[in-house]
Image (spheres, rainbow, N blue to C red):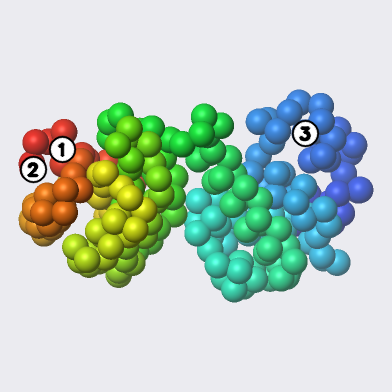
Amino acid sequence: MSAQEEYPTAVREMAEEDRPRERLARVGPEALRDAELIAILFRTGTRSVGAVALAEKVLSHFGSIRAVARASLEELQQVNGLGHVKAIEIKAALELGKRLAAFTDRGRTKIRNAQDVSDLLMLNYKDCETEQFKCLLLNIKSDVLKTITISTGGLDGTAALPRDVFRQAVREGAASVILCHNHPSGDPEPSRDDIQLTQRLSEAGALMRINVLDHIVFGDGCYVSLKERKIF
């Protein structure tokens, strides 16, 4: 049964106990499906498609909520019935979710190990379809001063020059840095180039008395720490 056949054209035509807003109030947001949550954002559908059915179309078009989060405003509007305003509502809601997941009310984030880095950055990397090289700048207490993006590459690599990494580290007064990048393939196993780059940046940092604490390679929901592997 299609989304259009399963749901009435308008939410108001649904039985009250089945309406997304009423269900959320009654059983909580955790009980709602992705399409129902998106439908609440939409409030209304189109003349021919109800809000829930339109939300189902969006999920069907992209295949998953994760793919929806990755989509640009232009790509979202390729779904028939999804206009500029509704596309903006989706992007805003998903961005709030990302920020909430990364939020900490303990002041600056302290980095004690690779898992702390993963907790901080994994969500950002999950939506990356190309390789991105980031750097955590830390103070002497291992608190994060800033997270910076050094470079963005294609599907098979990106460049990170010592001057780009350490220029900002010096500017922020960082005592140490942690290198991070992702493999869009989903496999975080470090390549030979990854290892050589880590060694090169570690040597450059030593000259400037800025310690390279680790290089973490992110995959699909997983990571590898070169420090834990004792690669450098």
Residue annotated with mark 2? 232
Residue 172, percent across and down? Answer: 36, 53
Do the CB atoms of the residues marked 3 and 1 lie less than 8 Å apart? no
Q: Amino acid at mark 3?
A: Leu
Q: Give the residue at mark 1.
A: 227
Residue at figure coordinates x 61%, y 69% from the top left: 73
Q: Is residue 166 above or below residue 110?
A: below
Q: Please state which of residues 154 and 216 is positioned toward the viewer in this rendering.
A: 216
- SS at badge 1: loop
Mark 3 surroundings within 10 Å by alpha-carbon count, few (fewer than 14), some (14 through 19), many (20 or more): some
N-terminal label among 1 and 2: 1
For the residue pair 106 and 218, the one nearer the viewer reads as: 106
Q: Secondary structure at mark 3?
A: helix
Q: Quadrant of residue 226?
A: top left
Q: What is the C-alpha distance between the residues marked 3 and 2?
A: 51 Å
Residue under pointer 3: 24
**Crowdedness near tag 2: few (<14), some (14–19) or many (≥20) residues, C-alpha within 10 Å:** some
- For residue 118, say whether it is visible: no
Q: Pointers 3 and 2 in contact (CB under 8 A)?
A: no
Q: Quadrant of residue 33?
A: top right
Amino acid type shown at disc 2: Phe
Sequence-first disc among 3 and 2: 3
Badge 2 element: loop
Residues at marks 3 and 1, CA–CA distance in whole angstroms: 45 Å
> Which one is nearer the viewer's eye here, 32 or 8?
32
Q: Residue at x 55, y 50 (%)?
A: 65
Quarter that holds the C terminus: top left
